[in-house]
Image: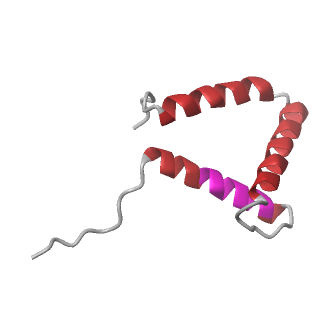
Amino acid sequence: MRKKTGPKPATKNEERAKRGEAALKAHAWDSGAVWKPGTEADCYLTDLLADLMHWCQWKHLADFETCYRCAGNHFTEEIEGRDDTP
């Protein structure tokens, strides 16, 4: 008898990607757009990044360029499996 298995558990990077998609969808919705996956994803991401740049300038709480570089480093470590996040 074959053992029944459920869906494959998501990897940490899949979970990270899902959180990113949720942020994009929420931002698109809040901006009055209708989420359409595909070619328009670039536009949604660009708008979200631009809004985050405005937030950094407005609140003076973070330097966007520094955070962007740091995020790139985190991403590289995560896709290479060098992160130590549980």
Q: Residue at 85%, 33% (x, y): give it.
A: 59
Q: Position of residue 36 (x, y in %)?
A: 74, 68
Answer above or below: position of 60 versus 41.
above
Q: Would residue 64 be seen by someone viewing this image from the given angle? A: yes
Q: Quadrant of the N terminus?
A: bottom left
* Furthest residue toward front: 39
Q: Which residues are magenta?
A: 19-28
Q: Residue at 85%, 39% (x, y): give it.
A: 55
**Image quadrant in which you'd find residue 75:** top right
Q: Residue at 71%, 62% (x, y): give it.
A: 38
Q: Quadrant of the C terminus?
A: top left
**Image quadrant in which you'd find residue 40:** bottom right
Q: Is 8 situated left or right of 60 in this image?
A: left
Closer-to-camera residue (5/40): 40
* Furthest residue toward left: 1
Does the magenta run of residues contain 2?
no
Answer above or below: position of 69 versus 58.
above
Number of numbered labels in the structure image:
0
**Image quadrant in which you'd find residue 41:** bottom right
Magenta region, main secondary structure: helix
Q: Position of residue 67 (x, y in %)?
A: 71, 28
Q: Position of residue 11 (x, y in %)?
A: 42, 49
Q: Is 65 situated left or right of 75 in this image?
A: right
Closer-to-camera residue (74/52): 74
Does the magenta run of residues contain 26?
yes
Q: Residue at 16%, 71% (x, y): give it.
A: 3
Closer-to-camera residue (73/59): 73
Q: Would residue 63 be seen by someone viewing this image from the given angle? A: no
